[in-house]
Image (cartoon, grey):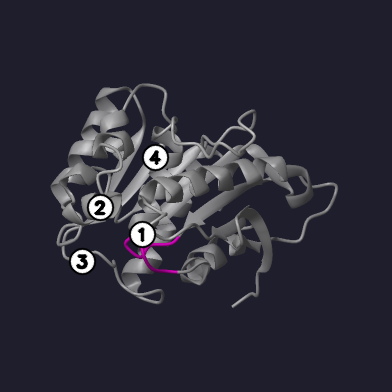
Amino acid sequence: MLKPVIQVFKQVGRLKLTAHLFLPAASSAEPPRPAVAFFHGGGWVDGSPLWGYPWCQHFFERDLVAVSFAYRLVDQQTVTPLEAVQDARSALRWLRAHAVELGINPRQVIACGFSAGGYLAASTALLEDCDDPADDLQLSARPDALVLISTPVEICDDPWFSELLDRRLPCQVLSPARHIRPGLPPGLLVHAGRDDMVAYASVAAFVERMRQAGNRCDLISYPAEDHFLGGPESPTRRAILGQIDEFFVSLGYLTL
């Protein structure tokens, strides 16, 4: 697998959050590329940008800029899911601030994630009032498209999330499903019928409400799969990557 370039995109106290960049070779004659900002899973308490490498490798091979981002993990003392959301929004601002040097089209930034990382990707689009006060708010944290894989979108039904939030603010503030409105970016959701961590019905309801609000929201179902949707080399994972490619083609971000 390609070794990414690692840069610090944000520092909070002594903690340095890193961006792991998969950068296709670029020339001055080529137009800026779409960028995929990937957020790993791990239940908000575990995980690493390394978990996003197989996904980012695939996007890199499609000649897209792909970046696997770190974010603050919940310690139930000073960090809650709110801080993770802030970091995800900071990540998209960082991409746009460095668009020229990275060869990125700042109007083609895709937020993508798996499980808890999918929640963070969704939050960059739906939770507009969850910014880090240190951010340059003149830079947009809104993605131009969403790819959400095994994603909890209605977190008020999740006792684990409520425990992590520790009653510091109402769960409705941080629930993407409670912030659906017209004019949101086009989205693709991939979900398993046998997901015992995130109920399929909650995702289907989210998709239906997004559509009712006039947003493009595609849903691809895998009835026989579980939350993890196969490993990196599984037929299921290869099929999912192909369907994501087709979604990007439909947006004009990719030519196959």
Q: Is label 3 in a helix, a strand or a loop?
A: loop
Q: What residue lies at 32% left-to-right and 39% top-to-bottom?
A: 174
Query: How far separated are the C-alphas under marks 2 and 4?
Result: 23 Å
Tag nearer the camera, 2 or 4: 2
Above or below, 188 against 25 in this view is above
Residue 44 is labelled as 1
The residue range painted magenta reads 40-47
**Mark 4 residue type:** Gly
**Mark 3 residue type:** Asp
Q: Earlier in the sequence, mark 4 or mark 3?
A: 4
Query: How far separated are the C-alphas under marks 1 and 4?
Result: 22 Å
Residue 187 is labelled as 4
Q: What residue lies at 16% left-to-right and 46% top-to-bottom?
A: 157
Query: How far separated are the C-alphas under marks 3 and 2?
Result: 20 Å
Above or below, 133 against 73 in this view is above
Q: Is label 2 in a helix, a strand or a loop?
A: helix
Q: Earlier in the sequence, mark 2 or mark 1?
A: 1
* Whether label 3 touches label 2, CB < 8 Å: no
Q: Is label 1 in a helix, a strand or a loop?
A: loop
* Whether label 2 touches label 4, CB < 8 Å: no
Q: Quadrant of residue 206?
A: top left
Looking at the image, which residue sits at the far front?
A: 77
Q: What residue lies at 85% left-to-right and 48% top-to-bottom?
A: 28
In the rendered structure, the answer to whether residue 13 lies left or right of residue 186 reads: right
Residue 161 is labelled as 2
* Whether label 2 touches label 1, CB < 8 Å: yes
Residue 226 is labelled as 3
Q: Earlier in the sequence, mark 1 or mark 4?
A: 1
Q: Is residue 253 visible?
A: no
Q: Main secondary structure of the magenta part?
A: loop
**Mark 2 residue type:** Phe
Total numbered circles: 4
